[in-house]
Image (cartoon, rainbow, N blue to C red):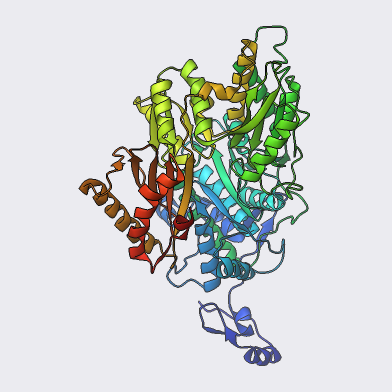
Amino acid sequence: MTTSLRPIPAFLLLFALLLVGRDDHGASYSVATAFLAPRPPLVARSKHRVVSSMALAAESTAKNTSPSSSSDVTTDFPFRHAAIDTHNEPPNLRAILSSLLELKSGSDLRGTYVGHRSSGGTIANISDPIKALKRESGGVALTPFAAHCFGAAFARWLLSRPDARTGMDELKVCIGRDPRLHGERLADAFARGVEGVDGEDMPVKVLYTDVATTPSMYEFVRADKCDAAVMITASHLPEEKNGMKFFSKGVGGLTSQNIGELIDLAQDEARQWYDMGILPSSSGNAGVLCSEIVDFMPYYKESLQRAIIREVDSASALSDRPLSGLNIVVNPGNGAGCFFADLLRDLGANIAGSIHLTPDGTFPNTFGVPNPEKKEMVEETIRACEANDADVGIMFDTDADRSGFVLPRTVSSSGTRADHEALNGNRMIALISAVFSRSSPGCTIVTDSTTSEALSEYLENNLGLRHYRYVRGYANVIGKAEELTESGQANAEVAVEISGHCAMKENGYVDDGTYTAVKIIGLLARVNAEGKSKGSLLDLISDLKEMPYEEEMRIRVTDGSLDTTTYVFQQLTQSLKEKSEDGSAADWALDEDNQEGVRFRLLSGGHFMIRQSLHDPVISMQVESISQEEAREKVLDPLLMLLSEHDSVIDYSALKIA
């Protein structure tokens, strides 16, 4: 069989010879190549769907192929993957694929937002800003194109699950976002990616609920409002950052392994578009194209209101306004948690002193992106509480999965509150634990590895609870709590990280800053109802010993190598253990139960620990001591001597000035 080529006019051949260049592989090419090579697949577009001609061809082939040859046809997903030499990919494609991989941050995706044209242009153009960001700052780009690829990947991942078609006639994916200005652009690209997947007899629909909180997205899945959800957020990270958190039925929050599976599928999607040579369309800043615009947040607000009423347990005539008489300052920092103030007002609380109550991705007149650990946010919340005689101040991070609090230290005989201070870190864990010591005596509290020695003593000796320390990272802590409970090893009522991430068994182990606030507010209302309003909630944890000196420092590896970081960390931990064992560091006692890095108890009180970052060339060190002088003499100076052996590859100046 012979194939005839289209005749090419002589003047075009001559012009082509003058425009010889190099492709991404370094091979010669000319304009003539464009005429002689097969054209990229055309794209058929419907209102909400993008389906390539390769997909249509694959579907047609699958329907008309005999069973004996069906193994040659991929039917799991609508796109058939072209054969790619993964060992010699074009540099532009390689940059795009690498950036998709590097977005992985544990069980989330995170990167620096980098925009591009909403239509037109070529895939190769995307690689330029990706490479520029990498070159200039080492950052990882999160582009609308990446969002599109992950949208398609999520839809395919969901459809491939064994239970995907059980009792369902359509697959509904809900998208929410925090107020960051580029969140809507990413939501639109993600939605188009999801709805561009042909589910065959299982239509795939996107529901867009606009600004929402991360825990609310999981609640929408749990309440059967959708089958899966994605929250577009970078939490407390700077404004230019963004990311994604995923949820689905039967899984809950996607795990690190699940994210790896999504990345593989997203890279396959990127290869398809690269082969076609064009960018998928998006709406730019004109909105989100999807099957349905919804507003699910009122449902979530009502569920929290019911939870507060249960916490107060009021059977009086005021049960629909159980927070009457409480002055509460809410500071969501213009993030997604702004709705919480209205919720409290509806239940009778006075919220007149609350600040930054409008979601706004420019975060105007504030300290930047909200973070309850940020000194500036704590200080302005304290000022607002002092000015408004507040019973409690509540802070949320951008997506409201984390909270922090401010409480009065003193309450006068007339009920005036003063000397407000932060309830965070070990203090917050202690107060939440005190709540559960009453409702679930003897239960287990799972925390990250950096919590204090004094907290352990308080939980076990004062509250009669069990304290289980685990690897830092909220997903790790929550996962361990679930494991302990499911296996019957413990009744882990609370999984909480010192940063404020807190998940409770009664709430399905969802880390929810607003639900944590529900527990604190409920406790406050109960104490007031019992006639104990003349004191502060801080009085409930007065037996918690707090060290005057607490610092966290970072040792940075100057060559940026994780291998060097591992080598230095191993050498340092070995030296520390030897000093403890041979008696040259008589003030240290190795914590044998520690599960992350190496931790030593100080005989004078407190502890210090070092741990290696999994993703960055950094060794973190934490010290708590009875005084700065004690920390310097017993910990920092001995460590400086050990670290000096690695002068050429590390920067440990933070320890010299601590």
Residue name at image x 59 percent, y 86 percent: 21
Q: How many marks?
A: 0
Between 439 and 262, the one lying in front of the other is: 439
Q: Do we see residue 332 in this rendering?
A: no
Between 380 and 606, the one lying in front of the other is: 606
Query: In the current view of this chain or complex, which residue is farthest to the top?
Result: 316
Rendering coords of residue 574 (x, y %): 27, 53
Left or right: residue 164 versus residue 324 is: left
Rendering coords of residue 267 (x, y %): 52, 59
Q: Is residue 275 above or below residue 180?
A: below
Between 367 and 553, the one lying in front of the other is: 553
Between 654 and 361, the one lying in front of the other is: 654
Residue name at image x 64 percent, y 50 percent: 190
Q: Is residue 284 above or below residue 523?
A: below
Residue name at image x 52 percent, y 21 percent: 435
Q: Do we see residue 348 in this rendering?
A: yes
Picture quadrant of residue 136? bottom right
Rendering coords of residue 41 (x, y %): 61, 65
Left or right: residue 407 versus residue 479 is: right
Rendering coords of residue 541 (x, y %): 51, 24
Residue name at image x 72 percent, y 10 percent: 318
Left or right: residue 83 versus residue 424 is: left
Query: In the current view of this chain or complex, which residue is farthest to the front?
Result: 629
Picture quadrant of residue 146? bottom right
